[in-house]
Amino acid sequence: MNNKINFAWPVTSENAVVYQRFQSEVERLKDTLAAKRIVIFGAGIRGCCLLRILEQRGFTDIVFCDNNAEKQGHLINDYDIISLGEALGYESGQVFLIAPENSGAISQQLTEAGLTEGKDWFSFDISVYDAYVSEYRRSVSEHLLVVGDCAFSHIALKDEVTDSLGEMMKARLREHRCKVLSMHGIGQQANYHIIRSLLDQKERPSSVFLLVMEALTPKAHLMPRTQHPTLIQSLVDTVPNPRAEFTEYAKLAKERFNRFQVESFASFAKVEGDTSEKLYMQMNYLFKIREETEGVTYLKKTIQLLNDEGIPITLYIPPVNYMQGERFFGPDFKKRYMDNFTKLYSFLDKCDLKYSVTDASFLLTDDEFAAAHTTDETANYSGRSKLLNFFSESEPLRSLFE
């Protein structure tokens, strides 16, 4: 009996800038890659994206390497996940491709193992953190501040037009009237500190558009992929006289990241018929929301902060592939999904918080997502265009788009 866990992410989308970098690097290195076994260092989201690009180009002699001992000995689809020691023990020619962001520690590991950059290993790292910090620091005023996760920065892998939703919003509103701070998986506590730090620096948006999905899940704030400690520390270092709580949060994010907890959907006990995608949807959309979770707590704090500043806030509920949800969970998926939001709004309303909602939960058809059967909220270009028009016609945002 095979008890190996498949840690493959159902990758159908990627950050637009990252995807373009991966494509160009694979093309540049195609002759080198054809002659050797490929070791993808990093069995996470970016590693799965890189795998897909390699497979599309016919590469199959591939193995994954990861420092997380809980992943070693398991799989990404049909490809083994091994330790660096095992990888170094392979006798034939091989080449390491470093997939994760912020991969300086991995580069150092390979160098200390006697391997040479540009010969034995290549870094595919591109810093989406630098782009985030640059956008954070960009001077604007009386603008729409958009804050959230990869819904604003990612594209479908099949897209020919690679403008993200965030870039499309900036183009429609004009760049000086819109700032977009998006990072995959980032949580509500991080967003709270980031928004507060901008206010401390006298940046005053006319309105805030905040994605709230992370508030629904009880453990998302503990997962390594949601921490971004390097980004958070970079922001703290950017702020003149940062608040003590922002500095403490940077330390907390680093501590959480270093715990290397297994990603939530992959660590469930599986039963026959379960898939990673199904478990992912269950974790993200069908958990019974609790008021005491960190996501809800910091969503309340964020709304209260903006209420105190007299700045309107709109909560953005992104599209969910409810068609896939109904395939997995039956026709009551929509009701179960909306029950969580009913509870969330009750938590907020009893605190007398003032907010608006732009709910795009069921706006898209399955052919307007990154893939028809994906669990990813990312829309393809057609879907992103539809969302942009939806924003411009919604009551909380209509005046900004006029």
Image (cartoon, rainbow, N blue to C red):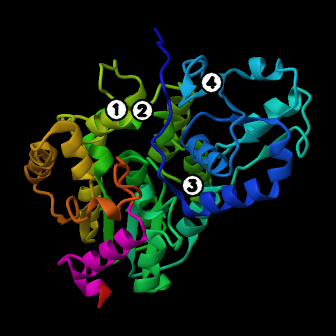
Q: Quadrant of the C terminus?
A: bottom left
At label 3, the amino acid type is Leu
Residue 80's tag is 4
At label 1, the amino acid type is Lys
Q: CA distance from mark 2 to mark 1?
A: 5 Å
Q: Which residue is mark 3?
A: 235
Corner quadrant of residue 296: top left
Residue 258's tag is none
Q: Main secondary structure of the magenta part?
A: helix
Corner quadrant of residue 142: bottom left
What is the magenta range? 379-400
* 57 vs 389: above or below: above
Q: How many marks?
A: 4
Q: CA distance from mark 3 to mark 4?
A: 37 Å
First in sequence, mark 3 or 1: give its number.
1
Q: Is residue 278 magenta?
A: no
Q: Which residue is mark 1?
A: 219
Q: CA distance from mark 2 to mark 3?
A: 20 Å
Disc 2 is placed on an element classified as: helix
At label 4, the amino acid type is Asp
Is residue 321 in view from this perspective? Answer: yes
Q: Is residue 386 magenta?
A: yes
- Density class for disc 1 (Cα within 10 Å; few <14, some 14-19, many ≥20) is some
- Residue in view at x 75 percent, y 17 percent: 86
Find out whether the residues at labels 2 and 1 contact each other: C-beta distance under 8 Å: yes
Quick one: 289 or 291, which is closer to the camera? 289
Disc 4 is placed on an element classified as: strand
Residue 222's tag is 2
Where residue 291 sits: x, y (%)? 18, 38
Find out whether the residues at labels 3 and 1 contact each other: C-beta distance under 8 Å: no
* 224 vs 190: above or below: above
